[in-house]
Every structure is written in C-alpha cells, then in structure tokens.
Amino acid sequence: MSALNATSLAANAESSAAPLKERNRSRLRSAFRAFCQDKAAVGGAIVLGLVILMTLLAPVLPLQDPADADPTLRLKGIGTSGHILGLDYQGRDMLSRIIWGGRYTLPAAVIPVIIAGIIALCLGMTAGYARNALDSFIMRIVDVLFAVPDVILAIAIAAAMGPGFFSVVVATTLVIIAPLTRMAYSSTRQQRDSEYIIAARAIGASTPQILWRHLLPNVFAPVLVYATTIIGLLVVFTSTLSFLGLGVAPPASEWGLMVDEGRKVMNVSPHAAWIPGLLIGVVALCFNLIGDGLRYALDPRQHRR
C-alpha cells in the first residue's frame, strides 16, 4: 500500500470516529424494528419471557413445596382440586415441580453457552486474525473436539464427574466450545481484510484494539445468533442427561428428571411425563424462533429497504 493510500485511509477512519456511536445506536434501533416484524420470533420471546418470569418468581408464588407429597392423591390427573396439572407418582404437585424445575433446566442450558461463547470469541477471533502458527494450533485443537461425537463426549464427561448440576454445566460447555469457536473463526476470517480493518492498521491501532473494538461488533452478531439456537438444543440435551441419571439427583425437580419419573407410570398417568416433555419442546422451539428472528434482524441485507 502506498503512503498516499495509507494517509487517505487514516483520514477516513479519523473522520468517521465521531459519529460511530450514533451509527451503532441506529443499527440497534433498526435491528430491534426488524426483530419486531418477525411475529414468530416475538411470540417465542413472549412465551419464553413468561416461562423465565415464573421460574424467577417461584419463591414468592403461592405454590406448594415441590418436595411435599400426598400419597392419597398420587397420579391424580389434570384438574384435580388444588392441583391444576395433577400430581406425580409420589403425590407431588406437578405445577410446583415444573416451575421450580425451570430453575435447574434453564440455567443448565444458558450458563454453558455464555461461558463457551466468551471462550470461543477469544479463541476464534485470535485464530482468525492471526496469520501464523497460532492459527493452526488453535484450530487443530478445535478439530480434535469436533472428531468426538457431542453426545458421547458430554455423557463421558458427566459420567466421570458424577451426577449433579455442575457436571452438566461443565460437560455441555466443553461440547459447544468447538462449534462456537468455528463460527467466530469463520466470521473473523471474512472480516480481517476489510477496509475498516486496513484503516485501523493505518492509524496505528494495536492488534488487541483491532480485535475488540473493530472486529468484535461484526463477529459477535453471527455468534449470538448461533448461540441462541444452541441454547434451544441444550434445553433438550441437559434434560436428556437428567433423564439418563447424569443430571441433578432426586428429589430435586428438573424437567428431564420429571420425564424419566413420569415414564415409569405412562400407562396409568401419562400426564406425569408429557407435561414436562411438552414444556421442554416449547422452550427449545422458542429459543430457535428467537434465533431465527435475530438472524433476520442482525443481517441488514435482509431488511434493507
């Protein structure tokens, strides 16, 4: 690059620095309007918000203790007096256990994505921007993780650590680091030779400044969309681990554990299994709808007029 071109790029970068925050705010407003135009995504966000709100308010809602059992009412169906969703095989209130169970199931799906997302952004952006052996070193480790089937890896880790909430979080975090890192890596590779990156180099920006100030806003959007859909999968996956006896242990109320307990009495009281199973599916669907809405909202090419 000639000195004249470098000077021109530096001047353009400096002149655009002032309205940068205003452009970012404008992009957020545009993305929010685009998201609101997707009725399915808005519906998913509303349903998910209600589920999250109920789980957060569980300690103050007029619910029975999820561990209290009334053997005289065991396996009573939906609509039983004082028990809207019926009772399970021990006579415990299904509504109370479902609401309290969300305090295990939802964090077990969201926390791993947050932790893995932070790690993946650091690794993927570093590898994607580097043009040396560091790139190959990071991505070969990711390839090794990809070589092991996700389900087998998670089950092996959870089984080695023993049942419990912590083991589920660790297992699922390690499983999803690889795909999130690959997404961050690909997005960084697409952006690293863009004009705004060349301009940042021309004005003397350091590598950390380029990565976190210039690249991160453009890499974060696709990673966020992908991470949102992964949360939907993890709702099902973490419930599966509990179903297999690798999650939280009884008498804790967790949706996957409730499905496993209800499976044993399916012939007598199917509601004990299909109610928590249906909720798992609905919450997973809501996360997928939100992810689709974010994909549309954060891609200006799809809603530019």
Image: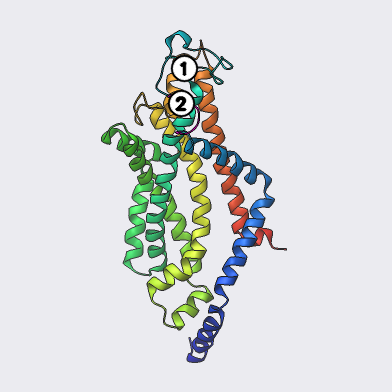
- N-terminal of the two: label 2 or label 1? 1
Q: CA distance from mark 2 to mark 1?
A: 9 Å
Image quarter hosting the C terminus: bottom right
Q: Judge by depth and name the residue closer to the eye, 9 or 44.
A: 44
Q: Is residue 62 magenta?
A: yes
Residue 19, magenta (yes or no): no
Which residue is most to the right? 305
Q: Residue at x 46, y 19 (%)?
A: 262
Q: Is residue 234 above or below residue 187?
A: above
Q: Position of residue 286 (x, y in %)?
A: 57, 40
Label 2 element class = helix
Q: Which mark is residue 97?
A: 2
Q: Residue at x 34, y 59 (%)?
A: 138
Q: Is the residue 251 above or below the residue 292 in the image?
A: above
Type of secondary structure dominating the magenta stretch: loop
The reply to whether discs 2 and 1 touch (Cβ–Cβ < 8 Å) is yes
Q: Quadrant of residue 131?
A: bottom left
Q: For the magenta stretch, what is the residue range?
A: 59-65
Residue at (52, 64) in percent of width and height? 218
Question: Whole-percent x and y of residue 172?
Answer: 38, 42
Left or right: 203 in relation to 248: right
The amino acid on which the numbered mark 2 sits, given as a three-letter code, is Arg
Identified by mark 1, the residue type is: Asp
Quarter of the image holding residue 12?
Answer: bottom right
Q: Is 117 or 32 nearer to us in this picture?
A: 32
User: Residue 88 — which label?
Assistant: 1
